[in-house]
């Protein structure tokens, strides 16, 4: 009888570990999916992926000190940064936007999103993603 209980508990533990693994994999896929979908949408709208885009990155932070620290780090990395208090937010009362001109590639944007998620979490904040404007492709001129 005790053997069956041990087997049952072991099977339950294995199922729990499998479920956790599937959840983590799904979460990672979802995290990367945002970058993929946004770049695909820009390309579908005719944006030229080989030209630099003005990209805005958005963060929500808990304190003025956290916003100032993140701003200093991002400015040192070449971003133009603006942050301001948000009166309506209790959890994250500071909003920060970092802007940089860059080409959009899925691997690069995935890497940046992961990096920014870690940076924001380190400061007790949240990375809210990015947005970029449309950069039209140049049409080929006949005769060239």
Image (tube, rainbow, N blue to C red):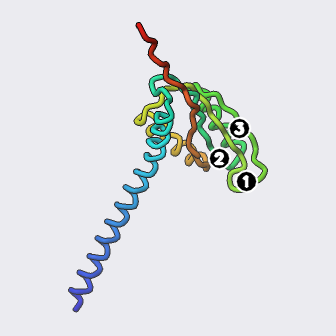
Tag 3's secondary structure? strand
Tag 2's secondary structure? strand
Quarter of the image where one finds residue 17 = bottom left
* N-term-proximal mark, 1 vs 2: 2
The label number, if any, that marks residue 89 in the structure image: 1
Q: Residue at x 66, y 47 (%)?
A: 61
Residue 122 location, x and y as percent?
56, 46
Q: Give the mark count.
A: 3
- Give the labeled residue for mark 2: 60
* N-term-proximal mark, 3 vs 2: 2
Q: Nearer the viewer, residue 109 or 72?
A: 109
| Contact between labelled residues 2 and 1, with CB atoms less than 8 Å apart | yes
Estimate how packed mark 1 is, as few (under 14), some (14 to 19) or many (20 or more) residues with alpha carbons within 10 Å: few
- Give the labeled residue for mark 3: 83
Residue 41 location, x and y as percent?
49, 39
Inter-mark Cα distance, 3 to 1 = 14 Å
Q: Residue furthest right?
A: 87
**Relative to 103, residue 140 above or below:** above
Estimate how packed mark 2 is, as few (under 14), some (14 to 19) or many (20 or more) residues with alpha carbons within 10 Å: many
Q: Residue at x 74, y 40 (%)?
A: 84
Residue 134 horizontal side relative to residue 93, left or right: left
The label number, if any, that marks residue 120 in the structure image: none
Residue 52 location, x and y as percent?
52, 23
Estimate how packed mark 3 is, as few (under 14), some (14 to 19) or many (20 or more) residues with alpha carbons within 10 Å: some
Inter-mark Cα distance, 3 to 2 = 9 Å
Q: Residue at x 42, y 36 (%)?
A: 106
Instruction: Locate the N terminus and report the quarter of the image it occupies.
Output: bottom left
Q: Residue at x 49, y 30 (%)?
A: 46
Inter-mark Cα distance, 1 to 2 = 9 Å
Quarter of the image where one finds residue 16 = bottom left
Q: Nearer the viewer, residue 88 or 74?
A: 88
Tag 1's secondary structure? loop
């Amino acid at each position: 009888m005790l053997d069956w209980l041990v087997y049952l508990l072991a099977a339950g533990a294995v199922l729990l570990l499998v479920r956790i693994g599937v959840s983590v994999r799904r979460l990672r896929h979802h995290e990367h999916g945002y970058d993929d979908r946004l770049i695909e949408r820009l390309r579908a709208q005719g944006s030229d992926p080989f030209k630099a885009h003005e990209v805005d990155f958005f963060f929500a932070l808990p304190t003025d000190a956290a916003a100032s620290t993140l701003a200093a780090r991002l400015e040192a990395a070449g971003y133009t940064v603006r942050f301001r208090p948000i009166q309506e937010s209790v959890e994250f009362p500071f909003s920060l936007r970092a802007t940089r001109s860059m080409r959009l590639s899925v691997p690069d944007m995935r890497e940046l999103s992961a990096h920014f998620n870690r940076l924001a979490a380190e400061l007790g904040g949240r990375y809210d993603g990015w947005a970029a404007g449309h950069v039209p492709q140049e049409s080929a001129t006949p005769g060239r």
